[in-house]
Each structure stands twice: as structure tokens, then as C-alpha cells.
Amino acid sequence: MASITIRNIEDEVKQAIRMRAAGNGRSVEEELRTVLRDLASEDGGADGEAGEIKASLPLVDGGTESSALSGTELTGRTVLLIISGGIAAYKSLDLIRRLRERGAAVRVVLTEAAQQFVTPMAAAALSGGHCYTDLWDRQTEIDVGHIRLARSADLVIVAPATADRMAKMVQGIADDLAGAVLLATRAPVLLAPAMNPAMWSHPATQRNVEQLKVDGCHLIGPKTGEMAESGEAGPGRMAEPLAIAEEAARMFSPLVGDRPLAGRHVVITSGPTHEPIDPVRYIANRSSGRQGHAIAAACARAGAKVTLVSGPVTLPDPQGVDVVRVQTALEMKAAVEEVLPADVAIFVAAVADYRASRIAEQKTKKTEGGLTKLKLTENPDILASIARHENMRPALIVGFAAETQNVEAYAEEKRIRKGADMVVANDVSHDSGIGGAGGVMGGERNRVALATAKGVETWPEMSKDEVAERLVLAIAEQLSA
Ligand SMILES: Cc1cc2nc3c(=O)[nH]c(=O)nc-3n(C[C@H](O)[C@H](O)[C@H](O)COP(=O)(O)O)c2cc1C
């Protein structure tokens, strides 16, 4: 990448470029590149100097060239990535790529400690722009660059967020570029903490995390796993770059901006139930919990206090959600009743309709007639019982119906029969064509019909995350009606 210098340009032009750069929230060098690129594209990429410069210039913003990259969620957004000094800093170089793949213009600030782990050169090359390291940089501070950096960002990500950086943020310390930018920004802030498990679980760090949440920061991770330090494991691994980039894109959803469920308590059931027959066997179904967990995460992003009552699933707990783990339908019903009152209850779990009338203490033998003598007892209907709860019926009750035919008709019929306000019916038939061989249950995508008192609307096929977002917006609208 050729570097650009404005030393040999007339003073008047220099000043004009500086003013233009300040106005556009760019560094002088970035502004110059933009001017040259615009010039080159006016030339239609014709032969000559401008055309050659265009070919060698990296992308610096989410303009037309970024549309060639996959993903559109962050197109036109400027993300300021602050890399602080943890071992996970090397992963943040990949995060730059992931953000740019989604169309974001990425500006990078490296703390002094971060420069022990990654170089400004690598960050600059990957972001396609200047890498900012110094509050006292004479070039960028000519027009108070740290304020400009802070103001030009649509989102600030701190990844990794060290224990030290989070402590400084809580105190409002601005003795370096990262600290000054974090105090000056008005953009939402997403933190991806990464540290040794002992540092993470230290009461000081936990106090700081809670304070940062109160201050409005969003957190992703840390994950539990092995540490770089040999023999150390536990919570403290930075979330994967892909997950951080996806979370960054989600930060621009109206859920996060408007927090339409702030102050509400939402109870959600998710996953299957396991109904034991004997010590080794149980009755179950194919539910993965993906849709219910996605709704729990979306409610939390929308500002709700969320209690997720989850059957046995292999999914990680959604961010910012209280999880109560259960196995059976009876346990699920008791857990839901225990966490009431709530403003909204969403029953997504695929609760087994029947349980074994008697659970054998020993493994049932084939020679004794085995399971052919299995007697079943109907499980309670959790949705209907909460919808008709005498004194603690949540203001809004949402049921789910897994159907294999006549999806819309069953949705409305179930809504009335169960006393729910909304029913989301999904087509779980194999010939729905969704989710490959496994179908909707266990898959990533869903096609649903939403039945409310106003009628039934069918939504196009989308990811379970998108279904969750749209449902939460519909719930918020209904609550405020
Ligand atoms: C080898 C090494 C690895 C470190 N890894 C981490 C880490 O993963 N997380 C963390 O919070 N601090 C870690 N630290 C400590 C920070 O680098 C230190 O607290 C520093 O002051 C952070 O500064 P910054 O937040 O301004 O980047 C590490 C230190 C060293 C020497």
C-alpha cells in the first residue's frame, strides 16, 4: 500500500483537505484517498495515474466497493474497534475482516499494551486505513482527532476488553486515546471481555461488568474454555470474531436502539422435555431449543428482564438471560409458576404430551414384556394453565404450535382454544423444504404464521434469529397498543 503525504501540496489546498477531512470525520490521509478514488472513478478507471491509484487503494469506507463483499448488515456503518492489551488481541485482526465483510468501515485504535500483541501495521493493512495509537499524535490531533474519531463512529467495539480497560471505563479515565474516545463517544459500545478466569471472576471485575451494563454497554462473552496459560480453563475466552461481528450487526436492530421491552419481565420456555421411563430411557422429541433461545436473546436485547426455562439442550445460555434448567414437563410447569409474575410469557418449548405413568426404578427388561406394557399419563398443558391463571396471568401470552399441515388454520384455532393472545405456528413438516434433512426442528431456519386477534399473517422463510426479532417487535407493539 503506497503511503500518501501532503507535504508538497500548496498550503491553501492542504488547509482545504484538512477542513474537508474534519467535516467528514476522516483522517487527512483517508480524505485524500477518498478524493483520489472519486477522481479515479470519474475517469471510469481509465489508464493513467488516477486509475492506477484506485487499483492499489484499500477500501476505507462502506461505499460502492464494499458491496462486492458479502453481507449487508453493517453497510454504511462506521465501526471503531478498540483493541486492548490481551492475548486475544490477535483474534481481533480477524474481527476487522469479519466487520468489513459485512460492509462496515472499520477504524482501529490500539492501546499501548495491545501493541505488545499486534502491530499497528497489521491493523492498518487489514482495516484499509490509518491505525490510531496515540492521543498526542500531532497529525491527527490537529483538529482534535480523538473527538472526531469518537463522533464519527456508529458503534464502538472493545475487543478484547481487558480487566484493566473495563475498570478504567467504569472510572471514566481518559489518559490515553482509547479512554478519551470511550468517554467522548455517543455511539453504542459493545465489549468482548477476555482474560484469565480468576481475573474474570474477581469481585472487582464483576462489579465493573455490572456497572458497565448499567452505563448502557452491551457485552458479548466471555466463553468458557481453555486458556492460553497451560492447564488453565474457565470463563474468560473472548467470543469468536464471527459472533462479535454478528452481534455488532444486531446492535443496529430497532430492538437495541429503542429497547421496546425495557422494564418488562418476560418468561420463555424452550427446548424439549425428557420424560423418564426407567434409569436409561426417556420420551423426547427433536426440538433443539434454537428458536426459544433466539427469542430469549432478542427479548434481552430489547431491554427485558428475561427468565428462560429450558429443557435439555446443547446450546449455550443466551446473553443477559437468567436460565432455569429442567428435564420434565412437570418441572417446567413448576419453574414457570415459580418465576411469575411476568408481563409476557412465551411458550416455545416442545413439551412432551405424555409421560410414563410409572418410572421404573431398574432398567426394564425385554424378557418381562419390556416397553410393550408402558402406560402413559397426559402431561399438564402449561400454556393453557398459565393463560387461565387466576391471579398471575401475564398481560401477554404467546404460544407456539408445531404443525405439519393447515398451519394458519391450526394457529388461530389453538390461540382461541388455549386462551393465548398470539400463536406462532411453524411448519415442521419435512416437505416444508426448510432446514434440509432435519427440517425446522433442530435447523437454523423457520417459516411461521402469526395468529393474533387481528387475524393470521404468514411470514416468509427466515433465520430463527430473524423470526425472534420480528416476533419481539410484534410483542412490543401489542403491549403498547
Ligand atoms: C502476556 C500478557 C497477557 C495478558 N493478557 C491479558 C488478558 O487476556 N486480559 C486482560 O485483561 N489482561 C491481560 N494482560 C494484562 C494487560 O495487558 C494489562 O492490564 C494492561 O494494562 C492492559 O492495558 P489496556 O487495557 O490499556 O490495553 C496481559 C498481560 C500480559 C503481559
Image: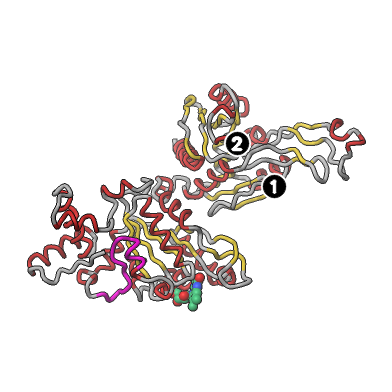
Q: Secondary structure at mark 2?
A: helix
Residue at point 60%, 62% (across, down): 225
Q: Does the magenta portion include 133?
A: yes
Label 1: few (<14), some or many (≥20) within 10 Å? many
Q: CA distance from mark 2 to mark 1?
A: 25 Å
Q: Secondary structure at mark 1?
A: loop
Q: Is residue 115 above or below residue 71?
A: below
The foreground one among 165 and 43 is 43
Can residue 126 be seen by looking at this rendering?
Answer: yes
> Pointer 2 and pointer 1: residues touching (CB < 8 Å)?
no
Residue at point 55%, 67% (across, down): 206
Task: Give the position of the C terminus as an image quadrant.
Answer: top left
Marker disc for residue 438: 2
Q: Does the magenta portion include 320?
A: no
Residue at point 44%, 61% (across, down): 215
The foreground one among 434 and 339 is 434
Instruction: Say left or right for 13 vs 202.
Output: left
Instruction: Say left or right for 383 vs 299.
Output: right
x, y percent for residue 50: 15, 56
Can residue 168 be seen by looking at this rendering?
Answer: no
Task: Give the position of the N terminus as an image quadrant.
Answer: bottom left
State the residue position of label 1. Answer: 326
The foreground one among 295 and 38 is 38
Q: Is residue 433 above or below residue 44?
A: above
Q: Is residue 413 above or below residue 1?
A: above
Toward the right, the furthest residue is 368
Q: Which residues are magenta?
A: 122-137
Mark with earlier residue (2, 1): 1
